[in-house]
Image (cartoon, rainbow, N blue to C red):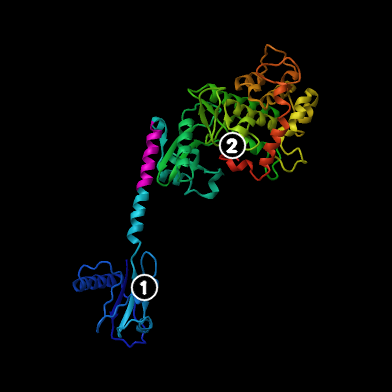
Amino acid sequence: MACCVWIPHQQHRHQKTMPWGLSSVLSLLRRRRRRKEDLIGNNSNKSWLLAAEEGERHEEEEEEEEMVSHSVHSSFRFSFGSQGDAEEAGLRPPAAVLLLVNLEDGAEEEEEEVKMEGRKWTKLQSLERSISPVSGSLVRFSYSQIRAATQDFCRGRELGRGAHSRVYKGKIGAGRRSAVAIKRVEGQDRESAKAFCRELLIASSLHNPNIVPLLGFCVDQEGLFLVYKYVSGGSLDSHLHPHGSRKKVLSWRARYKIALGVAHAIGYLHYGTDKCVVHRDIKPSNILLSSNKTPQLCDFGLATWTHGPSLPFLCKAVKGTFGYLSPEYFQHGKLSDKTDVYAFGVVLLELITGRKVIDQSRPQGDENLVLWAKPLLQQGEGAMEKLIDPMLKVTSWHEMSRMVRAASACVKNDECARPSIDQVIGMLEGEEFSCSTDWLTFSGNNSCLLSPYASQSHDQAPERGDMKGHLALAMLGVSDSDEEDSYGR
């Protein structure tokens, strides 16, 4: 509500007036309002009160509208004018100061803030109910502990960021001796809360030496946080594609160990839990390495449950990282365990070649790793040396051959032609199969097909066009980091 009050004074009309204290003004307003109500009864629709020191009060509707238009619209502001200003505005009282007070919106803003707080608490209570089945098995941290562990979210402690999250390194617990990675889920919308809840429920159910363990969480009005164990060796991406002057080559022994470890982690997700878990974002930046190069799969922000291995379902939205998306998922939203198998095949190609999945510095036509590698994979063992990282010293050609065959089988366009992750593990470990394990079996170029692997009819015609679609979208400025939530980079 806006009020205009004439305040009498004894000063000369050209002298400046002194500002009134807030309490004095409010007290004066209350007295003037009571006096006005006595005079004009219950006419509460008047928005302007004019109190004059002397003379009769002449009120005209046009003058009132002009005064309203000059009102200062804010929660609570004062506007002082001299007597000359008042006379210029057409107001008659001769010896008074014009004081404008706008009190509108204050109560409405307070009421809206209360409603927002209520809605926020309602969301938190709903979230608490959703995570209650597993919350008792995890450590619950307070927001003050999270702030202290991250030194108030210091930028120097930031390990990585994703589209909807940031990850910080921190120390927490007794004496702050435990190193942790604290993932802050950003956003106040319903989707952010759902993503937090899904990741917490999935990650809390996983217990495998090749998966980064979830230690605890924090649910607070200030944010949603997941606390993971910190892995000190950095990500596979940082070792395969180092930045700056760091050029140390990851050894073959380490690469083979990493391939087997990640395969076992995926096998556990698909077959080792009560529900089949599809990770949906397997890539080198989501594979962390310990000091002895033991790999641990991390970042379950996009993970989801499926009805079982090889039981696909359709997703409304395709999420993941370009270059690692299987054709059926990328084009039609068809998600299954074979989606992870395809992405793992791309990771195997990165381990073999040392190349990035999308590299714009490469010659035209060679930017996409899978598009470049497939013709060489189809040529057989004779082309294997062209695939291998030129900086790599291979110490076991048998292991290299097995990894190349596994990669070739995993990146088949038709998901029905891809092996399950258990079969991929068998291939990497050199298990014998009922059908000949020569190179042509896995390249899809002979009639002895190792079911359910290679099929020439499945993998020829649409292959290059599909991969060009991957490349075209990746080149539109969508980089690997757009969906990145890893903290090992």
Disc ID at residue 117: none
Q: Which of marks 2 and 1 is nearer the N terminus?
A: 1
Q: Is the magenta stretch mostly helix, strand or loop?
A: helix
Horizontally, is 46 left or right of 138 in the view?
A: left
Q: Does the magenta stretch include residue 119?
A: yes
Residue at image position (64%, 38%) is 322
Q: Is residue 357 at least partly visible in the picture?
A: no
Task: Say if 371 sits above or below 400 in the image.
Answer: below
Q: Is residue 124 at least partly visible in the picture?
A: yes
In the image as oriented, which residue stretches furthest toward the top?
434
Q: What element carries label 1?
A: helix
**x, y percentage for residue 414?**
66, 25
Q: In which quarter of the image is the C terminus?
A: top right
**x, y percentage for residue 102?**
35, 68
In the image as oriented, which residue stretches furthest toward the left?
38
Q: Quadrant of the N terminus?
A: bottom left
- Residue named by callout 1: 65
Going by the numbered disc 1, the residue's amino acid type is Glu
Going by the numbered disc 2, the residue's amino acid type is Gly
- Magenta stretch: give its range: 118-132
**x, y percentage for residue 275?**
49, 24
Q: Is residue 484 magenta?
A: no
Q: Is mark 2 on a helix, strand or loop?
A: loop
Task: Say if 35 sits above or below 239 in the image.
Answer: below
Q: Is 195 in front, or is 241?
A: 195
- Residue named by callout 2: 320
**x, y percentage for residue 389?**
75, 33
